Image (cartoon, coloured by chain):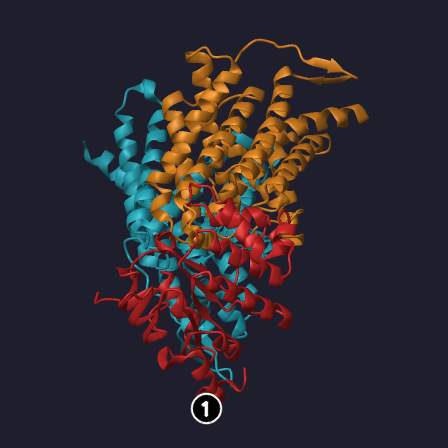
Amino acid sequence: MHLPGLVNYFIFFFSFAGIYAILALGLNVQWGYTGETNIGIAGFFAIGAYTTAILTSPPDPGHLGGFNLPFVVAVVGAIVVCGVLALLIGLITLNLRGDYLAIATIGIAQIIVLFITNEDKVTDGVRGIPGIPRPLSNVSPGAGGLLFLVLVVVFVGIVLIALNRLYRSPWVRILRAIRANEDAVLAAGKNVLRYRIESFVVGSIIMSIGGVLYAAFTRFVSPEAFDPIYGTFLVWVMLIAGGSGNNVGAIVGTLIIWGVWSGTDYLTSLMPAAWGTRGSAIRVFLIGLILELILILRPQGIIEERPPRLVDAGPRGEERSAHAPTPSEGTGGG
Amino acid sequence: MLLNVVQLTLYGIVLGSIIALGAIGVSMVYAILGFSHFAHGDMMTVAAYFGFVGVVTLHLPLPLALIFSMILTACLAVGIDRVIYSRLRNATPIIMLISTIGVSFMLQSLTQIVWGPSNEVYQSGIVLPYKFLGLRLQPVEVTIILGSVLLVVLLHFFLHGTKIGKAMRAMSDNRSLSQITGINTELVIIWTWVITGVLAAAAGVFLGADTQLNPRMGFNLLLAIFAAAILGGIGNLYGSILGGLVIGIVEEVSTIFIDPGYKPAVGFVIMVIMLIVRPYGILGGKR
Amino acid sequence: MSETNGNLLVAEDVYGGYGSADILNGISLRVAPGEFVSIVGPNGAGKSTAMKSLFGLIKVRAGKIAFEGREITKLRPDQIVRLGICYVPQEFNIFPSLTVKENLEMGAFIRNDDYSAEIENVYQLFPILKERRRQLVGTMSGGQRQMVAMGRALMLKPRLLMLDEPSAGLSPNFIELIFERIQEINRTGVGILLVEQNARQALEISDRGYVLVMGRNRHEDTGPNLVNNKEVAEMFLGG
């Protein structure tokens, strides 16, 4: 084990952990705060990645774009494209909850990936888009990886700080109240649908940032990377393991599950070559097993979330909090 | 052109029968157990591979391999319930849903571990199709349609003619009343999984016989299956049959106008339209 | 538990409710074999909750419940029903997509013997059910559904039949019919515990009654005495 190899692995591990952490934080806004079951994370992940690829890679007859634009443009581009798409999707799925929303988001992610795979002229289909430049790689040759890791950490930090600031805001309080008891929030006069769409769009945009960083790090995108296992399933396990509803939990869960995923990658790489893809299948099985164990033994995750308090508007529109009504107050003994 | 449409409709009925069998299973679990069984597609995949073992290792003819697979898949379904879902009886539907997603990926990866990632077939070689009125249909496709009809008829008799079948219908109506009445709800749940496993086995083996086997085969159909169940009104078994046939036919016929690569999206779009316009499905179902 | 004095059902100082707040604040009651007992009281008094707690549907925080001398406080509904108590909830008390006959069959689910005598018994009590035995109960009127609900509960030959507001939502004709049928059932020796909003009608046909207020016992007396009790009358304004 020599130092450069270790350093490279370190950079790789934590860069990816950071990317996944951002995905988990995005999911936390949708699911942890508002209770929206988005099983289509891979779709928004892909949008961020492919927008970056098309905007920043050099021209190539195989696919659209190649505008050679700087990284910043990719970030803005991803936010815009994803924001618009998420808004559209949010409007379509406006009245869907729980299982129905889950199925709808699975379908949407599948359509996005189908589009990427089929529309050769735009994305070069399964061949993918190579040559995506990594930002800051020209600043100091040799330290490019490390600098990028710093960039990832900065992005994670920005998202984390922003979400933590927002946590105490009325906006998030209402989101969490919606998750706990949507009817009560409706009765309090809030436009629940508007909040749900906002939460969905914000979460999706955060996820697309993860996609931007992914494209810039791996410098290559292809549809396989946005397979439901890597793009959606892993993120859900991370959030559930860490504790849905709180942002620190998202990060903790990401680190642990990514640790298991990466660590087992190393272990299966030691297996004889004949085992080939069975190695990754074993790892997926293991992650699934961990998920079931968590759901059975400790569904709240590692870092448990405090239950939210309802907000209701007083007669002059000021907000005062109240506790969710107990069933005895609500329905009576009869 | 018309002939083309009729031919595609025939293919659609074959595909639709497979989807319908899947949708019935999913509807049943939703109605009786109260959650969405996202692992259903992968249960079909494992069942198809059980059938593969029957055909290739045990040299059984396909019908016997199907029965072999039904037995194993029923045991698998009950086993998963005993080990995982039964410990989550009081969990929220969302947690149950996530749990089924976990099972889905576990089954998918298990299939890949045991049988590898590449495609398999039940039998190789060319089989001549039946030809009539300018249309073509493979023998196995006829088997699929007839087999599906037979299974639906048997299911109907089970649900209306046996004590457990009636109890299943009772539980899907009203679970708490079932407990108050003294119905053995755990027994009913076990039987639900047995039936679900049997239906998934049929759907999986039929799918494998019609196309090919690979670890993603069932998962790729999951969306169409749920679309069919929702279309017919989730929880409504006869609606699931109708929904399955509609989705199957529309998906096949759509290939005239749309790139076949987008076939899976067609069923999905139908479902989304249904969810917006009439969430309880064509025939109405359980909520 | 202390002797139940040959009583069919005894509840002592029961506290319980949903979640953290208790609805029942120490209620006690008893039913003797073959007795007809009603529980009445204003809205929110905890009458239905009390009945649910007896059947294991509500978490009992403190107190004891015993049936035929055997403690049942911690038992689940499917265990209690096997002991000889049958319960008819106020709402969602039938299986709508099953026929009348199938509903009755489900009532007899735990029986392995021939229950055709019990089915005939139900048809005798409610002749219209025999006429419509193949009809889906979901398509029947409220009163007919209530008959099916009660018939279902009789299939296990219970020694105690608990009914939660059987008259709710029924027309006056049906209410009279239902009460008359309940008395008929009682005449065959089945103990009746009735929760009712129609206090006067219930108490008039009861052996004894309990008036609950705010989850506590307020009055306990014979049916006729309670009917004539001024305070009770005031509470219900002739209802």
Identify the residue at horizontal 32%, vertical 49% (top origin): A241
Q: Residue at x 28, y 46 (%)?
A: A256
Between C95 and B105, the residue placed more toward the observer is C95
Tell me which amino acid carries mark 1: Lys
Task: Tell me residue C150's x, y (percent).
Answer: 52, 59
Image quarter where the N terminus of chain A lies is top left
Q: Nearer the viewer, residue C99 or B250?
A: C99
Q: Does residue A254 show up?
A: no
**Residue B287 % position (x, y):** 55, 53
Q: Colour of chain C?
A: red
Q: Is residue A148 above or below residue A321?
A: above
Compared with C120, A307 (above or below) is below
Residue C72 at x, y = what percent? 30, 60
Q: Nearer the viewer, residue C174 or C78?
A: C174
Residue B144 spot, x, y in % from top left: 61, 23
Report the label total: 1
> Please, what secondary structure does the residue beneath circle 1 have?
helix
Is residue B215 shown left or right of residue C175? left
For label 1, the crowd category at 10 Å Cα-Cα, with few meaning under 14, some 14 to 19 and many 20 or more, is few
The residue at the point 59 percent across, 59 percent down is C145
Q: Is residue B17 visible?
A: yes
Q: Quadrant of residue B253?
A: top right
The residue drawn where x is 42% and y is 12% is: B58
Residue labelled with disc 1: C230
Disc 1: host chain: C
Q: Which chain is cyan?
A: A
In the rendered view, would you say C57 is above or below B211? below
In the rendered image of the structure, the colour used to display chain B is orange
The residue nearer to you, when weighing C161 against B237, is C161
